[in-house]
């Protein structure tokens, strides 16, 4: 186990939170775009499985399924929701849900950021003795 294992895990969470914020902001920006399908980030379940050592088996049952591989060894992926339609123009963005998701993501990001700061403070104390 590396000295920076916890920092690496927090970094992965922060990166996932940033990707989620970008994805939610894209959904909000396209709330009035006809035939736009919202996207979401899948992270927590994949990350828990990766931490527990579960093996992933890729299984694509439809041509539109995205590849399951992780970029940069990161357990997160953006998934497009094509199963629902919110309005007659084919757009499926629910602005209320997006705003709730955005607020929840901000809290998640702040918590991880606070944990990372505390981790660096502990490392600093261990190195400097103060």
Image (cartoon, rainbow, N blue to C red):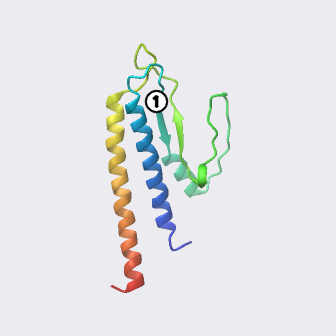
Q: Check disc 1 and report its element: helix, strand or loop.
A: loop
Q: Residues within 10 Å of mark 1 (few under 14, many from 20)?
A: many
- Residue pictured at 64% horizontal, 39% vertical: 67
Q: Nearer the viewer, residue 2 or 30?
A: 30
Residue 122 lies, in percent from the top left, at: 38, 75
In front here: 21 or 118? 21
- Residue 54 higher or lower than 98, as above or below: below
What's the residue at 50%, 63% (across, down)?
8
Q: How many marks?
A: 1
Q: Position of residue 5 (x, y in %)?
A: 51, 67
Which residue extends farthest bottom? 129
Which corner quadrant holds the N terminus? Answer: bottom right
- Residue matched to label 1: 38
Residue lying furthest top: 88
Residue depicted at x 60% and y 54% = 72
Would residue 3 appear left or right of 59 to someone viewing this image?
Answer: left
Give the image location of residue 35, x and y in percent.
Answer: 48, 20
- Seen in the picture, residue 91 relative to 49 is either above or below; the reply is above
Q: Is residue 80 above or below residue 9?
A: above
Q: Quadrant of the C terminus?
A: bottom left
**Residue 75 at x, y percent in the picture:** 56, 50
Q: Residue 61, located in which quarter of the rendered image? A: top right
């Amino acid at each position: 186990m590396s000295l920076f294992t916890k920092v690496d895990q927090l970094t992965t969470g922060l990166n996932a939170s940033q990707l989620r914020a970008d994805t939610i902001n894209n959904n909000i920006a396209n709330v009035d775009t006809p035939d736009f399908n919202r996207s979401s980030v899948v992270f927590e379940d994949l990350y828990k499985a990766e931490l527990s050592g579960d093996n992933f088996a890729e299984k694509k049952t439809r041509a539109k399924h995205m590849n399951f591989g992780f970029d940069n060894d990161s357990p997160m992926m953006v998934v497009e929701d094509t199963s629902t339609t919110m309005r007659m123009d084919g757009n499926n963005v629910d602005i209320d849900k997006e705003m709730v998701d955005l607020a929840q993501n901000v809290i998640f990001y702040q918590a991880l950021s606070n944990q990372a700061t505390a981790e660096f403070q502990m490392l600093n104390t261990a190195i400097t003795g103060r």
